[in-house]
Image (cartoon, helix red, strand yellow):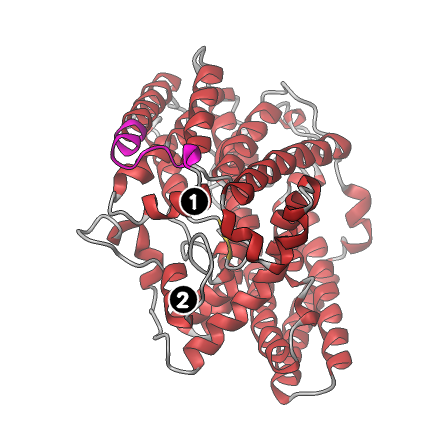
Amino acid sequence: MHDGDSRGGTVTDDDTASASDPHESKIDSRAGRPVTRLFRSGRTSRWLLPAGLAAVAGGAGIALGGGPTTSLVTLQLAIGLLVVVIVVTLDFRRDTQLPVLMRPGTAIVVSFLVGSVSAPALFRADYTAYLTMWSALAAGIVLGLLITQSAVGSGSKEQIGFDPRRTANLSLIVIAISMVSALIFFAWQGVPALQSNIEQARVDAAAAGTGYVRLLAYIGLVGVQGLFAIRHRLASPSLLIVTAIILAMGNRSPLLYLYIPVAFVLFDQKRIKVTAPRIVLSVLVLLAVIASIGVYRVFSQSQFASYAEYRSAIASRDYAAVALTSLTHYADVIPENAVLTKHLVDDGKLEHKYGATYLTLFISALPGQQLSLDREIKQVSGAQFIGGGTPPTLMGEGYVNFGLPGTILSGAFIVWLSRYWSRRYASTTTSGQTPLSALTASTYGYIICWVVGSPVAGLAGASTVPLAGAILLITIRHLSFRKQAHT
C-alpha cells in the first residue's frame, strides 16, 4: 500500500421499515429531520435530478469552451452547491436512521468537495481540464443518486441463520494469517518503521516482490472488526496487535480502515453515543495520530529537507508545521494528480487501461514486479520524489480506464456502494440479530472509509488494501450464515 509522500500524494434490503417496528428504535429515525424538511416534496425530486444533470453537463461544456478564471471559479462553486443540494434532497431525506455525520450523503459530499478546495490555484489550462473532470464526476454522483432511488433497498429483509461462531472462527483465522505474514515479511525485508529512511524504506520493501505476503499482513484489520462485532474476548488484544503491525509497516492510512469501522460497531452496540462533537473530536484525534506518524517519517528521511514545503520547518524543528503540511498537502495533490493523469492519457504517454487497474489486486500475485497505476504514472511522468507513486485520484483513475465516461461511472459507483451498504445496515437492525447488525455496521463503516479516501487514491489505483479488505469483510459476512440462509 502506498499512502505516499508530500509530492506525489498518498495513498437486498428493506429501507422502508415502519416507524411502529419495535426494532426501529435501535437507530434514531428522528436524526437529521430538520435538515431535510425543506426537501420532502416528491415534486422536488422529480425536477431536481434532471436539472442537476443538465447543469453539470452545461458546466462541462463551459469548461471545455474556455472563459475567464473567475468564471470558472464561479462555475465550480455553483456545481458544488448544486451537488450538495441534490445529495441533501435525495439522500438525507431517505437515510434518516443514522446521525448526519455517519450517512452516505455526508461521505459523498466530503469526498466530492474536499479535494477540489485548491483547484483554483491551478494554471488556467489545468484548471479547465480539472473542471471538465470534476463536472463529469458530479454528473456521476447525480446519476448514482438517480439509479439508487429505485434500485437500492427494494429487496427482502435479512434472513435468519447468522452464526456468530462462524464469524469468530473466520476472524481468528484471518488474524493468524496476518500475524504469520507480517513475521515472514519482516524476516525478508526488515521492519520499515525501524529503518532510518522510513519513507523510502517502506516503499522499497513493498516493491521488493513480496507479493501477497505484505498484503496478507494487513488483512488482520478485517478480523478485528469481526471479533468486535460478536464481542469476542480477544477483540481488544487483536486490535493492539494489528495496530502494531500497521505501524511497523510504516503506513498510516490502514489505521483509518481499522478504527473507523470498529467505531461503527461500537455505535451499533450502543457502547458509544454518537454526537457531532464526539465525532469531530475522534476524527481530530485520529488525524493527530496520523500526522504524528507523518512527522516521524519526514524527520527520518534527510531528503525531505530539500523540499520547499518542508525546508524551513525541518530546519527550525517545527514539528507542528511539519505535521500540518503532511496532512494538508493532500488537498493540493488531488487536483494536480487528476490533471496530470488526464494530460498523460491525452498526450498518448499513458494508454487507456479499460478496467485493468481494478485488477491490480489480483495481478500483483504474479511473478516479478507488477506496476500499479500510481507507480506507472510516476514513472511515465518522470517525477522524482521520495516515497510511493503518484495516485491517479478517483477522477483520474476513471479517466485512464474509460475516459470521461469512466469518471462519470466512478462517481456513480461510490454513490451506489455507500447507499447500498447503508440500506443493508438499516435492514439488519430490524431483524433482531445484534451480531449481524454489528458486522454489517463494520462493513458499512469500511465502505465509508473507502469512499472518503477514493478522491486521493482512487478505488484501486494506488493501493490494493482497501479493495482486498472490502472483499474479505463481505466474504466473512456471507460465510457467517448457515446454508439455508440467504444474504
Establish if 433 lies above or below 276.
Answer: above
Residue 6 quadrant: bottom right
Residue pictured at 34% horizontal, 75% vertical:
351
Residue 459 quadrant: bottom left
Position of 18 compared to 165: left or right? Answer: right
Image coords of residue 400 (percent x, y): 41, 70
Residue 486 seen in render: no
Q: Residues within 10 Å of mark 2 (few under 14, many from 20)?
A: many
Q: Nearer the viewer, residue 35 or 254?
A: 254
Mark 1 near mark 2, Cβ–Cβ under 8 Å?
no
Q: In which quarter of the image is the C terminus?
A: top left
Which residue is farthest front? Answer: 315
Residue pictured at 42% horizontal, 58% vertical:
389
Image coords of residue 412 (percent x, y): 52, 61
Q: Does the magenta stretch include residue 172?
A: no
Establish if 421 lies above or below 339.
Answer: above
Image coords of residue 168 (percent x, y): 37, 19
Establish if 382 lies above or below 244.
Answer: below
Span shown in magenta = 182-195
Query: Mark 1 or 2 closer to N-term?
Result: 2
Q: Is residue 192 magenta?
A: yes
Which of labels 1 and 2 is toward the front?
A: 2
Q: What residue type is labelled 1?
A: Pro
Residue, disc 1: 466
Position of 339 compared to 356: left or right? Answer: right
Residue 44 is marked as none
Q: Which amino acid does label 2 sit on?
A: Ile
Q: Nearer the viewer, residue 432 or 190?
A: 190
Which residue is farthest top? Answer: 233
Q: Nearer the viewer, residue 314 or 445?
A: 314
Disc 1 to disc 2, how far (Cα)?
Answer: 20 Å
Residue, disc 2: 377
